Amino acid sequence: MDTEAASVGKLYICATPIGNLGDMSPRAVETLRTVDIIAAEDTRNSIRLLNHFDIHTPMTSYHEYNRFEKADELVARMLKGENVAIITDAGTPCISDPGEVLVQKCAEAGIPVTSLPGPSALITALTLSGFSVRRFVFEGFLPRGARKERTAVLERLRDETGTIVLYEAPHHLKETLEELTGVLGSSRRIALCRELTKLHEEVIRTTLGEAALLEPRGEYVLVIEGRDPEESRKEAAAKYEEMSLEEHMRLYTDRGIDRKEAMKAVAKDRGISRRDVYNALLVTER
């Protein structure tokens, strides 16, 4: 046996309750009791959780502002044989959370990583929304400060046909809802989820236009219905109908796409057969 490999520790990604302490799994409790150290997003919040479950394992702070240097420190400890658990303030680490940096560094160093599944505000809200869950996109918190990046994300979401999930803080909620209304339209359906798993859990199912008039109370998970694919297809087809077939073809051939593939793409865009495109181009080229 490779004794050096056997001496390497392990990283445990431990989900913690998002509100209801009854959702803490026995496996997570046992793991937090037996690892050498717990990396917590905010030790002041996490100490209450540990006290509740009579867990006395030492903690170290691991958050957005120290994630790179602290990850290196924790990796060094695991390479010496220590086991580390990572927890966030609530829910599953690495989702809108700096934990992903630690996981990446463990993977690079050959350190085993395992995830203990459990509560997640993302999945809880998605299942409560009543919208399709066959396809969904998760954007976490929309970018702040970088207006160009934020606008690009919103524009991308405008044509998204899968269900959209966002997180938002109360002091930014109205601004975000107004922006979403402007980009996605006031009639787009939304479910606003708050206090998930708690006594006063609330799911408000309404439209973006109506949601923008609400007074925010607490942090929200926003679940927004995706765009109707047929509506998206019709809009795209109408846009392409405004240009000639030759112009449409040049959109693809100018990118280096061969003529045969370009005709296929044009036919798909316009909702017609490739033969129709071929025949129409023959007429114009004579």
Image: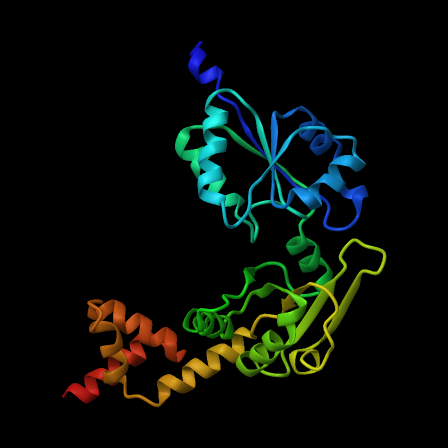
Q: Quadrant of the N terminus?
A: top left
Residue 24 seen anywhere in this rendered image of the structure = no
Displayed quadrant of residue 35:
top right
Tell me which colouring the rendered structure shows: rainbow
Along the viewing direction, whichever of 178 and 68 lies nearer the viewer: 68
Where 123 sits versus 232, above or below?
A: above
Displayed quadrant of residue 243:
bottom left
Residue visible at 67% across and 72% down in the picture? 190
User: Number of numbered discs present?
Assistant: 0
Residue visible at 42% across and 28% down in the picture? 110
Furthest toward the front, the residue is 44
Residue 127 seen anywhere in this rendered image of the structure = yes
Furthest toward the top, the residue is 1
In the visual, does 273 lie left or right of 37? left
Q: Quadrant of the C terminus?
A: bottom left
Displayed quadrant of residue 276:
bottom left
In the visual, does 233 lie left or right of 225? left
Q: Position of residue 271 (x, y in %)?
A: 41, 78
Residue visible at 60% across and 64% down in the picture? 166
Along the viewing direction, whichever of 107 and 173 lies nearer the viewer: 173
Q: Position of residue 148 (x, y in %)?
A: 41, 73
Q: Position of residue 155 (x, y in %)?
A: 46, 75
Where 169 sits versus 108, above or below?
A: below
Where 261 sits versus 235, above or below?
A: above
Residue visible at 19% across and 67% down in the picture? 256
Q: Position of residue 248 (x, y in %)?
A: 28, 81
Furthest toward the right, the residue is 199
